[in-house]
Amino acid sequence: MGVPIRSGSSKKHNNEAMKLIIATFFGVAFGFLLGVSFPTLALTKMSLPSSLFPSIDLTYVDDNYSKGATKSIWDAWASFNGNRSMPNKLQKSNDTKIWVPSNPRGAERLPPRIVESESDLYLRRLWGMPHQDLIVKPKYLITFTVGYDQHNNINAAIEKFSENFTIVLFHYDGKTSEWDQFEWSKRAIHISARKQTKWWYAKRFLHPDIVATYDYIFIWDEDLGLDHFNAEEYIKIVKKHGLEISQPGVDPSSSYTWQMTKKKDDSEIHKDATDTNGWCPDPRMPPCAAFVEIMAPVFSREAWRCVWHMIQNDLVHGWGLDFALRNCVEPSYDKIGVVDSQWIFHQSVPSLGNQGEAEGGKAPWEGVRERCKKEWTMFQERMASAERDYFQTRGDISLNSTTR
Ligand SMILES: *[C@@H]1O[C@H](CO)[C@@H](O)[C@H](O)[C@H]1NC(C)=O
Ligand SMILES: *[C@@H]1O[C@H](CO)[C@@H](O)[C@H](O)[C@H]1NC(C)=O
Ligand SMILES: *[C@@H]1O[C@H](CO)[C@@H](O)[C@H](O)[C@H]1NC(C)=O
Ligand SMILES: *[C@@H]1O[C@H](CO)[C@@H](O)[C@H](O)[C@H]1NC(C)=O
Ligand SMILES: *[C@@H]1O[C@H](CO)[C@@H](O)[C@H](O)[C@H]1NC(C)=O
């Protein structure tokens, strides 16, 4: 990340400035180390204003030795401050301005190597060395959208996920600390926002850059029976068959399911279903292929990056999304499938549905159901019109509308 240098005199200035920056940096670092190397009794927060660093926020040890520590930090700061005019002048000349167009949007002023554009959901310690924080780095993410009423079911479900999973619970009923009766809850991440849906949370908290570290992302409902399911085995199968978007087969004795997502008895996975009702004019299209339901989908990192972008901020129920997943992988009839040998039971507890509001003499769940259907139509229309616009601006007017 070298600072570009052009003229001789500016080079000299630069060298001096660099020396100075290095010297003061070590001064600050040394002072800081002094501070933290003594046992902590009380924490003192100190914040130093600066024009170069907007603020240095040091939480350091305050004990009998801390006067020394404080002094060295202030000494370092004073020398930094006193000599600040030079680096500042240099910053004003065009030569040392940083502008990296290939950085993420908005981060062009930063030297590339400091830019961290992706993150994870790993919990870290407050002490020790950062690189020693994590004993396991989970490669998979499981999220459940839950109400406390379902705690026994979720507790049973979590057992099916190994330590290779980061657990995130989205709470739609505001009850979070209640879950601490379960040991695993203490290593889970709890996100609480009242009366929101799975796709609302997913859009807000599972941005692809935030969950970029995970190979597979499970975004599941709370009313699934996992007696015949093992997550590690599931991942092995999904990898083996190259499924980018998948779901476990659903026990046919569960309440209503699509033909495609029903568990088959004689296979490890399947990628299509036989059309029994004349619903599938194209056997390679949803709902007979390239289709999983929104109830228990599993996405690869790449597939999720696409699907996340397709989720609409206002269409919170996600209805219709299952029919559009095929847009995100190619060829979709080959990369979307259902795993039969690890399967689930759908209990159909209308829990979040009951969190609606009684309106115009209708039960809460009726209002919710109506909105689900409306959203489905709206989503389809938006998708169709977006595709139409795209092909029209491309000048490809022979394509009148989308085939659907
Ligand atoms: C700090 O100093 C006080 C008095 O000077 C002394 O009684 C106390 O033991 C010291 N504490 C530590 C942690 O050294
Ligand atoms: C500026 O930095 C030099 C070392 O490069 C140091 O000797 C001097 O004391 C500093 N100036 C102030 C005002 O601290
Ligand atoms: C610095 O930038 C200004 C305005 O952008 C420009 O007029 C000037 O020529 C530049 N100087 C150098 C040395 O590039
Ligand atoms: C977790 O992942 C590691 C590395 O892939 C694997 O060796 C281990 O068996 C996994 N744990 C379980 C419980 O499957
Ligand atoms: C496009 O629409 C026109 C009339 O709306 C129709 O005559 C034509 O066959 C359509 N073309 C295609 C490729 O569907």
Image (cartoon, rainbow, N blue to C red):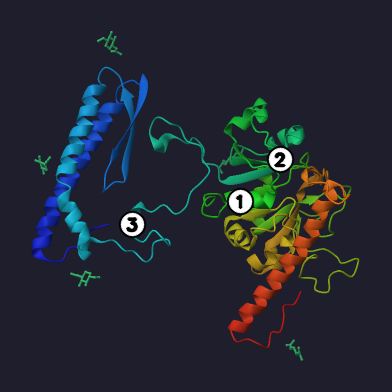
Residue 246 placed where, x, y %? 70, 56
Amino acid type at mark 1: Tyr
Q: What residue sits right under mark 3 in the picture?
A: 110
**Vertical placement of residue 319 versus 174, above or below:** below
Q: Which mark is residue 37?
A: none
Image spot of residue 260 (x, y percent): 81, 60
Label 1 crowd bin: few (<14), some (14–19), many (20+), radius 10 Å = many
- Dot 3 or dot 2: first in sequence order is 3
Residue furthest front as drawn = 360
Residue at left offset 68%, top offset 88%: 398
> Image height check: is 106 above or below 67?
below
Contact (CB < 8 A) between labels 3 and 2?
A: no
Residue at the disc numbered 1: 216
Q: Position of residue 189 (x, y in %)?
A: 59, 38
Q: Earlier in the sequence, mark 2 or mark 1?
A: 2
In terms of depth relative to the viewer, which is nearer, 246 or 189?
A: 189
The location of residue 87, given as percent across then percent down, is: 18, 52
Whole-number angstrom distance, CA of label 3 to CA of label 1? 31 Å
Quadrant of the snapshot with the N terminus: bottom left
Report if residue 64 is visible in the image: yes
Q: Please indicate whether residue 319 sits to the left or right of residue 78 in the image.
A: right
According to the picture, the residue beneath numbered tag 2 turns out to be 146
